[in-house]
Amino acid sequence: MHHAAKHHRRARKTNRRRNWNRTLQVLAVFLALGDLTALAFAPGLHVTRVRVDGAQTLSPQQVVEEAQVPSHTNLFWMLRQPLTKRLAADPVIDHAERSVRLPNLLVLTVAERQPYAVLAATQNGERQFWLLDHKGIPYRSLDKPSAHLPVIDAAAALPADVVLGRPLGAEWLPEAYHLLALARTDRALSGAKIAVDQNLNLCLNRKDMPQIRLGQSDSLPWKIALADAALSAYGGALSHRAAYIDVSCPQQPVWRPRAAPGAIKNASARTDTSN
């Protein structure tokens, strides 16, 4: 009996302690809610300053306007605003973040898409150009190609109209990017333009260098290595003598010499005489 009573008293003390702990926890929650409510409606915590970080081609004013930052809004309520979603709707912006700094500063951090290549294509009967980022997403229209970026010239039909900020969905684009990555690693093969024809054959062009015809996208590293070896052979003489190098069949690479200027003139003269 003595042991049972002692155990009963110990159990009652434990239950009282648990109940007291629960009461303290409930009070802590109410106090925290009260503090948060006070903070959420505190007039001294209204956003009065907005800082924009990361903008390069967009101005800070453009970022603020696109985010639609509301005025006279509490700093903590600002965290519930879909600011980053609005910013992500801009094709130039890859992603955006927002944060707050007490007592009244809102920080908008944007990461703009970086130019990687230019897409050239005919759409709706008109020659058009778009900036592409490293993921192959078009994000800005151009009047003409950039002198500092490689061009992907798509004679192959685009699957649909180009929509800025959305993936192209073209089956040949990953292969063109693969070729572009291979060409970037070799200064002798760095291409000014990659052409994709209607049959999805790839061709690498560079100013004052022979055209490199690669055919289909299979075995691209092997084909690039063959073209590189051909251009380097004989002290680089082939780079001046060849009109093009065809490695579409890597087992049988071929090249065609450039026509001599005299031969072109003689051919023109013969044509004129025949008329």
Image (cartoon, grey):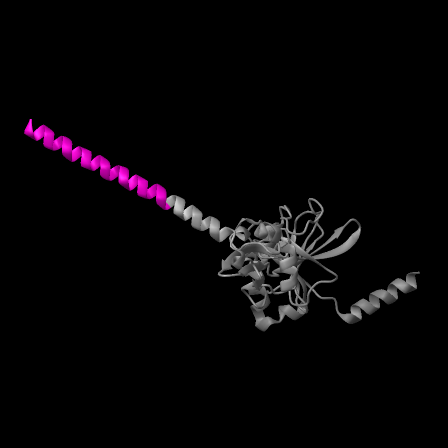
Dominant secondary structure of the residues highlighted in magenta in the image: helix
Rendered image quadrant of residue 110: bottom right
Q: Is residue 154 above or below residue 22?
A: below
Asked if the stretch drawn in magenta spans residue 245, the answer is: no
- As drawn, the residue found furthest toward the bottom would be 235
- Specify whether 96 is left or right of 145: left
Q: Position of residue 223 (x, y in %)?
A: 57, 56
Q: Residue furthest right?
A: 275
Segment colored magenta: 1-28
Position of residue 173 measured from the top left corner of the image (x, y, whole percent): 62, 51
265 in relation to 138, above or below: below
Q: Can residue 18 be seen in the rendering of this structure?
A: yes
Magenta residue check for 27: yes
Image point (36%, 46%), residue name:
28
Q: Quadrant of residue 208?
A: bottom right
User: Is the C terminus in the top left, top right, bottom left or bottom right quadrant?
Assistant: bottom right
- Above-or-below relation of 21 to 76: above
In x, y percent, where is residue 47?
56, 59
